[in-house]
Amino acid sequence: MKRSILKRIFSYLRPYRGSLVLGCISAVLQVAFTLMTPVLIGRAIDCLIGPGLVQFRHLAVLLAAMALCILLAAGFQWVMNVCIRRISALAAQDMRQQAFNALNAVPISTIDQLPHGDLVSRLVNDTDAVSEGLLQGLTQLLPGAATILGVLVIMFYLNPFIALVVVLVTPLSILFARFVASRTHALFRKQAAAQGQLSAYVNEMVNGQDLVKAFGHEAQCCETFDRINEELRSASLWAVFYSAAANPGTRFVNNIVYGAVGVFGGLAALSGALSVGTLSAFLTYANQYTKPFNEVTSVLTQLQTAMASAQRLFQTIDLKPEPADAPGALAPERCSGRVELDRVDFSYRKDVPLIQNLCLKVEPGQRIAIVGPTGCGKTTLINLLMRFYEVDGGRILVDGVPARQLKRSALRGMYGMVLQETWLKNATVRENIAYGKPDATMDQIIQAAKAAHAHGFIQRLPQGYDTLIAPGGGNLSAGQKQLLCIARILLCRPQMLILDEATSNIDTRTEMLVQQAFEQLMEGRTSFVVAHRLSTIQTADQILVMDAGHIVEQGTHRELLAKGGFYARLYNSQFAAQ
């Protein structure tokens, strides 16, 4: 599993192989000039402790060479760091873009099943963790690998016996680091999952804070938060505990290496096999040899976090997208508005039937109202018309063409939707109204706002149509947000309309004005209106009364009242006081 994740992470480096090659070359050159310095220092020491004579001229040349090596090593290290930072940032950008594209390509059903806060955490926190892991890993691994190979070559050249001692002790450090890594991966994966769960819960509670306070659930919310926070703390504590033990343990083993070099090197110097300067160089190389192991274990936390975060990020990227449009799918520019549901079956769960054998024929220009108790299938029917969900059985036809034979983008472009839950992006009022028609002129935007009776309050905003709407529309009332959504549809003037409780957040006086605007907009257009307030759909051509996924009654307002059935009971229950 870890190997496949690591392989996939490195696949994101391929487009930037030029920078990666430059970074590798810079790392090798940095190491080469760094490793030359101990040799020069050793020779300089030998110049100072010669038999009664200090070789000043040779010493000056060696010092100049050391200064040049240090300068070049620093320069190539800077080039390497720039390349690695660029690569890690671009790779993280690509991952985040792919994850976001995946979320835009998946069916609505997938989005409905995933905690939204957790998705945000994956695209933000997990991507940052992968970027940091790449940065730390590459900046340590590239020069580290070059250092280990270079030092081994030099040490075997200087004294094969002492070099062999170093090689024999090294596996202890590697085995210890591997042991710690195997213990921490699962813990860091659990930590990342807990982080996502915590983000989802905080997002949920912040959005519903007014209701939390209204119902007095602050204490319960804090208890739930404490439980999730404790899970995160526990996972983080044990993950950090194991990873924190890696560096001291590796340093202990590496100090054994250094001690072994000192003992055997000292014996060799006493026997005349090594000069004092060469022994000094050997000790420096022993430090440089063990340094990469120390550095890798010091960033083990970031590396393990990056692996766990990458796994969650790849799960998002691998979400199954909506099936492709059928071969030869049509994209008609216009439609007359004839819609037919032919024995449609649908359920969210296979073991819980919802809509069964639903049949409906809607002629062009008709206004169809859909009413019924909560959970009867009204909004589900709208989701099926838009192909947000696919029918389990039967078919839906538009102008006689099965919906599956139409491109989704073309089908959805035929409808204009105004929903009960308003959505406005963090942009200006003008940009939000023109969301469905970005090339609209300012005059067209103003006319749409006037038709939706939004122009008046827009003019009273600080910058009018250029006022920036806060995230989630926090600087507007619920009714004002709904009016802007209505203006957005009025500007697009779609061929068919779907109004799902479109006036639910508007006061009675404004509702009357908006109904007039809708009357004008619906003229000649097929319209589907979902409503709880039955006073708003009395002029509909057909009223569908749904219950438990079935159309139990169908007719005009007067006809259904005269029947005295389900619709009449619903209507009378709303107006009993009157």
Image (cartoon, rainbow, N blue to C red):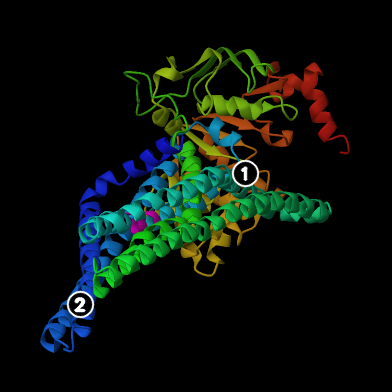
Q: Quadrant of the C terminus?
A: top right
Q: Earlier in the sequence, mark 2 or mark 1?
A: 2
Residue 53, image quadrant: bottom left
Amino acid type assigned to the residue bearing label 2 in the image = Met
Residue at image point 80% right, 28% down? 570
Left or right, residue 116 beside residue 310: right
The residue that mark 2 highlights is 66
Q: Which stretch appears magenta? A: 137-141
Residue 139 located within the stretch drawn in magenta: yes
Q: Nearer the viewer, mark 2 or mark 1?
A: 2
Is residue 428 shown to the viewer in this render? no
Q: Is residue 92 above or below residue 467?
A: above
The residue that mark 1 highlights is 421
Mark 1 secondary-structure assignment: loop
Residue at image point 44% right, 44% down? 100
217 or 71, nearer to the observer: 71
Amino acid type assigned to the residue bearing label 1 in the image = Glu
Mark 2 secondary-structure assignment: helix
User: Badges 2 and 1: C-beta atoms under 8 Å apart?
Assistant: no
Main SS of residues in magenta? helix
**x%, y% of residue 291?**
38, 62
